[in-house]
Image (cartoon, rainbow, N blue to C red):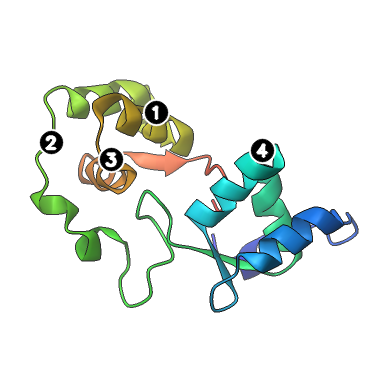
């Protein structure tokens, strides 16, 4: 979801230390998914807190680790990463289908877990989920 399409509570103050940390990690005025998740770990807070704070600061998120958004010149990040040529471990497709269930929806967090479990890059799991027709929901950072 684009930043301008979100309902943002500008009356809720952003913690100064979170704002300063976000600002220190900006590249071209944007915050990458990886930098936001690293900040959450460093600051001992949930990634959604970093994402919502970035929204309040009108900072755009970029370079989704699943390849879903934030890749200028490309609709998704999969092509530049070359994930289509990577081998798919046995059982990964079935694991993703199982994780998605009957609604064919799977959370960002669950995809991260499967990437870790199968020792593959997160962006490959995002690509594979898309190829299987699964809808990714519940972004760690609240991007969608």
* CB atoms of marks 2 and 1 within 8 Å: no
Quadrant for residue 118, please give it.
top left
| 65 horizontally vs 143: left or right | left
Considering only order in the chain, which callout, 3 or 2, is on the residue closer to the N terminus? 2
Considering only order in the chain, which callout, 3 or 4, is on the residue closer to the N terminus? 4
Foreground mark, 4 or 3, reads 4
- Cα separation, mark 2 vs mark 4, equals 30 Å
Local secondary structure at mark 4: loop
Considering only order in the chain, which callout, 4 or 2, is on the residue closer to the N terminus? 4
- Cα separation, mark 2 vs mark 1, equals 16 Å
Q: Which residue in the structure is indicated by mark 1? A: 113
Indicate the position of residue 21 as horizontal and vertical percent values. Answer: 71, 59
Local secondary structure at mark 3: helix
Q: Which mark is residue 88?
A: 2
| 118 horizontally vs 88: left or right | right
Q: Which residue in the structure is indicated by mark 4? A: 46
Q: Which mark is residue 125?
A: 3
**Label 4 neighbour load within 10 Å: few <14, some 14-19, many 20+:** some
Local secondary structure at mark 1: helix
Indicate the position of residue 95 as horizontal and vertical percent values. Answer: 26, 22
> Taking 79 as reference, is 129 above or below it?
above
């Amino acid at each position: 979801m684009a930043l301008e399409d979100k309902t943002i509570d500008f009356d809720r103050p952003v913690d100064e230390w979170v704002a300063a940390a976000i600002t220190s990690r900006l590249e071209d005025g944007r915050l990458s998914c990886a930098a936001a998740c690293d900040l959450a770990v460093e600051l001992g807070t949930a990634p959604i807190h970093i994402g919502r704070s970035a929204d309040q600061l009108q900072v755009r998120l970029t370079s989704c680790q699943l390849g879903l958004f934030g890749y200028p010149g490309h609709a998704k990040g999969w092509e530049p990463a070359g994930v289509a040529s990577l081998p798919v471990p046995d059982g990964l497709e079935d694991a993703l289908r199982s994780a998605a269930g009957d609604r064919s929806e799977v959370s960002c967090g669950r995809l991260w877990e499967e990437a870790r479990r199968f020792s593959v890059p997160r962006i490959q799991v995002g690509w594979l989920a898309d190829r299987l027709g699964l809808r990714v929901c519940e972004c760690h950072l609240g991007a969608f």
